[in-house]
Amino acid sequence: MNIDEKVIERAKSIRLALFDVDGVFTDGNIHIDSQGKEIKTFNTLDGHGIRLLQHYGIQVGVITGRRSEALDHRMRDLDIEHLYQGSIDKYAVFQQLLSKLNLAPEQASFAGDDIVDLQVMSHCGLAIAVANAHDFVKKHAHWETSATGGQGAVREICELLLESQGLLQEAFTYNLRKP
């Protein structure tokens, strides 16, 4: 990984990785079937990245403005305990979660794609925009992924955090050591 040193320094302190959903965990498209049920597509590489963060003690959370049963299922599959759906005021949720976990804002990262994510992004230790984020959001991010939402951006973020904390090479061989 060829990442700016300032980004690496910020990423070293991260103990809580937070994500928006639509446009970050997904490609941002909303699919609705003929019965009105929402369907979301998630990337398995992203899921494994989340599992690696959890394995190495970095907590993971999601703050999203929408509600979705599909998201409930995926986050349960990934054992993500900090799931906040229907969060109109993402910053208030961010503050409550930091207080609950006894963390400073500098110990949290937030990955977003649209202007509704900027308030949290402007107060966290590492603000991340995915490649398909709105240009205005990219201007306010500390770092931008090369992958788009739903296409490996979350995995890229997970690897950045692990690399900055000296854990990525071990993480790559983690499953190889299991019998």
Image (tube, helix red, strand yellow):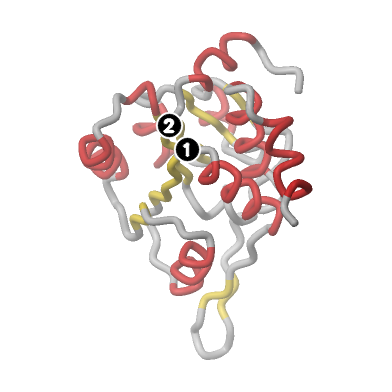
Q: Secondary structure at mark 2?
A: loop
Query: Judging from the image, what secondary structure is the residue with disc 1 in?
Result: loop
Give how far across and how far down residue 74 sits, in percent: 53, 66
Quarter of the image where the N terminus is located:
top right
Q: Between residue 132 and residue 149, name the one nearer to us.
A: 149
Image coords of residue 115 (percent x, y): 44, 38
Label 2 Cα crowd, 10 Å radius (few <14 / some 14-19 / many 20+): many
Q: Is residue 113 placed above or below 5 in the rendered structure?
A: below
Mark 2 and mark 1 in contact (Cβ < 8 Å)?
A: yes
Mark number displayed over residue 8: none
Q: Residue furthest front?
A: 179
Establish if 30 lies above or below 167.
below
Residue 148 location, quadrant:
top right
Q: Position of residue 153 (x, y in %)?
A: 66, 42
Q: Residue furthest top?
A: 5
Is 87 or 52 nearer to us in this picture? 52
- Assign the C terminus to one quadrant of the image: bottom right
Q: Amino acid at mark 1?
A: Ile
Gap between marks 1 and 2 measured at Cα: 5 Å
Mark on residue 15? 2
The residue at the point 65 percent across, 52 percent down is 48
Percent across and percent down for residue 64 are: 40, 53
Is residue 39 positioned above or below 55 on the image? below
Q: Residues within 10 Å of mark 1 (few under 14, many from 20)?
A: some
Residue at 57% over, 66% down: 30
Residue plotted at (59% across, 16% down): 8
Q: Amino acid at mark 2?
A: Arg
Relative to 4, 56 lies left or right: left
Pointer 1 residue: 58
